[in-house]
Image (cartoon, rainbow, N blue to C red):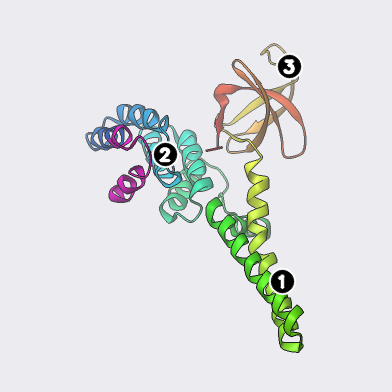
Amino acid sequence: MRLIVILLLSMSPCFAQAQAGFERGIDAYRHGEYAEAETLWRETLEEELAHGARARLYYNLGNAAWRQDHPMEAVGWYSACLRISPRDSDTWRNLEFVRAESGLEPADRGDLRSTLKRALLALRPEEARLAAFVSLGLLALLLAGEAFGGGRVWRRLAFLGALFTISCCLPFFFRLGDAAQDPMLVVRAPSVSMRSEPHPSRQPIGRLDAGEEVERVDSLPGWVRVTRADGVLGWVQEEALFPLRP
């Protein structure tokens, strides 16, 4: 895993500085200096990194947060990692373990909705884009063959190609919608209040449970306006939220 991260870091323009920060973080982590490792890896995140290298840093930061008894922060880092690298089995295993230890529902509940969402997000953004473009190119060739060659075989191939293209484009369009969002994770246990205005004296208009995902709408110093899954809008203290967008 360490070699993979180094190779990914080498793809970035600031390879030397990023690799140095990553290596120092690894050394600090091995010596039990988890806070120091976290600081070094956070600094490395400020560099221009390849998506794969950024995902591995998120994973490492999740491990450091867990070692420092910050389980909800670890959930946030692992969740952010999976938005970039959705098929990483180590991250999925750690995420589900920490969520279980924190008394949260599994990230993948196994129901139809969770399964469908995981399937649509199984491809990384660049993979989804490539699959969509390749399938569209294949469909264009099949349609050209049907137009110039005609016949039952070409029509069937064009029909099958259309179905294949739709299945390949769905993850791409789902990713487009996902990229337009600005999700945040509630990391304050057991819950946090939503208020009508960004001030602690205002009457709560709702609550958000730890582990719940919300959408950022606006922000002010120390406060973030979010929308809940049911559409309720409210202000939440910024320290209670973890940004999931890479």
Q: Where is residue 66 shown, x and y percent of the image?
A: 39, 37
Query: 197 or 127: nearer the eye?
Result: 127
Q: Is mark 2 on a helix, strand or loop?
A: loop
What segment is highlighted magenta in the picture? 1-19
Residue position for label 3: 197
Residue at 49%, 40% (x, y): give it. 75
- 142 shown above or below 186: below
Q: In this view, does 124 lie to the left or right of 64?
A: right
The amino acid on which the numbered mark 3 sits, given as a three-letter code, is Glu
**Where does residue 175 sit, x and y in percent of width and height?**
63, 50
Gap in Å between the C-alphas at discs 3 and 1? Answer: 50 Å
Magenta segment includes 11? yes
The residue lying at 56 percent from left, 37 percent from top is 245
Q: Which of marks 3 and 1 is in front?
A: 1
Give the Cα separation between the discs numbered 3 and 2: 37 Å
Please name the amino acid that badge 1 sits on: Ala
Q: Residues within 10 Å of mark 2 (few under 14, many from 20)?
A: many
Are the residues tagged 3 and 2 within 8 Å (C-beta)? no
Which mark is drawn over residue 245? none
Seen in the image, is 55 located left or right of residue 186? left
Q: Name the residue under label 1.
A: 162
Residue 214, horizontal then vertical, whole percent: 66, 35
Q: Measure how far apart labels 1 and 2 are at the Cα level.
A: 37 Å
**Residue 20: quadrant of the picture:** top left
CB atoms of marks 3 and 1 within 8 Å: no
- The residue located at (55%, 23%) in the rendering is 239
Across and down, in percent, residue 85 comes to 48, 50
Disc 1: CA contacts within 10 A as few (<14), some (14-19) or many (>=20): some
Of the numbered discs 1 and 2, the one sitting upstream in the chain is 2
